Image (cartoon, coloured by chain):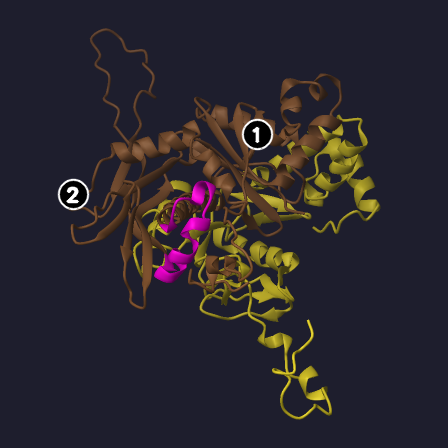
Chain colours: A yellow, B brown
Amino acid sequence: MAISKKTATGPAPTSFDDMAQAGSFDTQVLRLPGNRGPWTIMVSPGKLTCRDGRILPVPAKAPHDTGFSSNVEGGLGNGMVSDLQRLGGFVVVPHRRPVVAFGSKHEGLSNYLRMHEGSGPNGRGAAVYWTDAWTRPVMYGHILDWEYDHEGRDEWLEGLIDIIAPKGLADAQIRAAIQPAVSAAQALMDREDRRGKRLLAAQVLHIPAEHVPDDLRDVYEAAAGKGMATAKK
Amino acid sequence: MAAGPWYSGSGIGDANIAVAARTIQIALDESVKNKEIMGHPVMLDLMARDTGLGQLMGELGVSISLATVGTGKLAAKAEGTEATPTNWSVANSATVSPARRAWARDVSDYASSLQNSLLTGELSPNEIAVMTLDGLGAWVNDIVDRMAALFASATYEIGTTGTALTWSPLNEGVVAFKNRGAGRGPGLGLISAKGVNDLNSDSLSLGGGFQFSPEAAAGISRLQDGAFVGSRNGIDWYLNSELDADGADTLGGVISNGSFLMKHQRVALPSNADMVLDAGWYTQEMRRPGGGINRVETVSYNAIGILEQSRYAAVRYKTA
């Protein structure tokens, strides 16, 4: 639409250079998915998994918000923490435990959580949204995307084994960690279709090399040899 | 478009234009999937148990203990020998403490006067209808969101980390579910679109009888079924967008009766409150904060927690 003479008042501009420098991406408001409160991570000696050749504890979340379990205002999620301790044998991972995320040390109210402040969905209202330390937002114009440091997170999770098995993992714990992946791989091994073979190659590499059962050994070595994933000890 | 309170020039007031009258209808949002599960038998059971616990009277929460009964075995005992009594035990217990949860919206008198006649469908006839529909949505979304958050606290899991969901681990997980004694009654599954697509691709590539089984056929999604994507392994699966991530995995879930404990406290509005609605589960009150504004606050006092871990499981699969 043409600017009418009535609004185009004042001296004619001689340069637009200053305008181009007026904005900064650093000042962009995060458009968050909504509000999400913090939580405490808990781990259990009986809840483990194996991923990319590592045995890892599976973290459980104990949300701090009231409305979960018997949480009370300002109680930092003690009700939910207590439930998970009682119901599943979970233990608390201290918030001050050192964390490295995205290649650098992360410290905050909680070392393993990040608090993000911005607007709510579609830019409406104010929102506070917590993520773990290995997740951070990035804005592309009005589009919110998330960056993840899955490798850093898995390294940290692996370190939590000293909480649930200070003397090392027992055979029962190792079995519990690898059994779902072994069962899934064994089921896929009998399949003839291409999808099944592709899934098998991906699945088998999650099992730590030293725990690959004999019937999956050939498949494992073939998949590891093709470099389909970074199988680690 | 100017998001904000519903004034004559912002929020829904954005619909005012100079040249012609508009009508206003409700926008589609993916959260509509939350409402679709509220009538499922598992959700009805959750709400019935909630109601059955009655009103709190002087206490701040409710607790349920799970007594181990009928699990022992008779043993051989000679005549004249009395059996030694076995101790009773309480397996575990859950406590939930209802907490105030609220959601508020503003609408100006001027906006109402300008726009009430434009409201159509579910939004008609006026701003009160909009507020009641909005409050219901907020209450449902909150319940489903917190329920989905509990998947990250599950002791039992179906599926494997870092891989697409396939039929075999799902089947094994359901067998494990049944083996714990929890495989009775209805099952409700919440899953993302990626999870459903993983399962369907897997079912269709399995070949043989499975490829053509009713369960595989059920996976061929029907548009008119909404969020419901078929029953598989005796579980009614619904698409859901409230699911949390755990690293690179998505955590869906399978819930059976008795897995969660929910408790609402019915808090009636006092006689001097300007009540819009008392739905029992929540109330809506209108206030006049000043400046020709009506503020409607939807308030529910409730909490949800885990009642019995054995009765639910997280469904884990690679997100992307």
| Residue A197 located left or right of residue A69 | right
- Look at the image and tell me whether residue A132 can be seen: no
The correct choice, above or below, for A137 with respect to B36 in the image is: below
What is the x, y in percent for residue B286?
28, 55
The residue type indicated by label 2 comes to Met
Q: Which of pointers 2 and 1 lies earlier in the amino acid sequence?
A: 2
| Chain of the residue where label 2 is placed in the rendered structure | B
| Residue B69 located left or right of residue B178 | left
Q: Which mark is residue A142?
A: none
Q: Magenta region: which residues?
A: B105-127
Q: Residue at x 64, y 30 (%)?
A: B221
| Chain of the residue where label 1 is placed in the rendered structure | B
Graded by Cα atoms within 10 Å as few (under 14), some (14 to 19) or many (20 or more), the crowding at tag 2 reads few
Say which of B121 and B76 sits in front.
Answer: B121
The correct choice, above or below, for A218 with respect to B68 in the image is: below
Q: Is residue B197 magenta?
A: no
Per the image, the residue denoted by label 1 is: B225
What is the x, y in percent for residue A10?
63, 91
Per the image, the residue denoted by label 2 is: B57
> Which label lies toward us, 2 or 1?
1
Which residue lies most toward the top here? B79
Whether the residues at callouts 2 and 1 have beta carbons within 8 Å, the answer is no
- The quadrant where residue A181 appears: top right
The residue type indicated by label 1 comes to Asp
Say which of B165 and B66 sits in front.
Answer: B165
Q: Is residue B112 magenta?
A: yes
- Report, in whole angstroms, how far the alpha carbon at label 2 lies from the one at label 1: 43 Å
- Magenta stretch secondary structure, dominant: helix
The correct choice, above or below, for B169 with respect to B121 in the image is: above
Graded by Cα atoms within 10 Å as few (under 14), some (14 to 19) or many (20 or more), the crowding at tag 1 reads few
The correct choice, above or below, for B162 with respect to A213 in the image is: below
Q: Residue at x 29, y 41 (%)?
A: B279
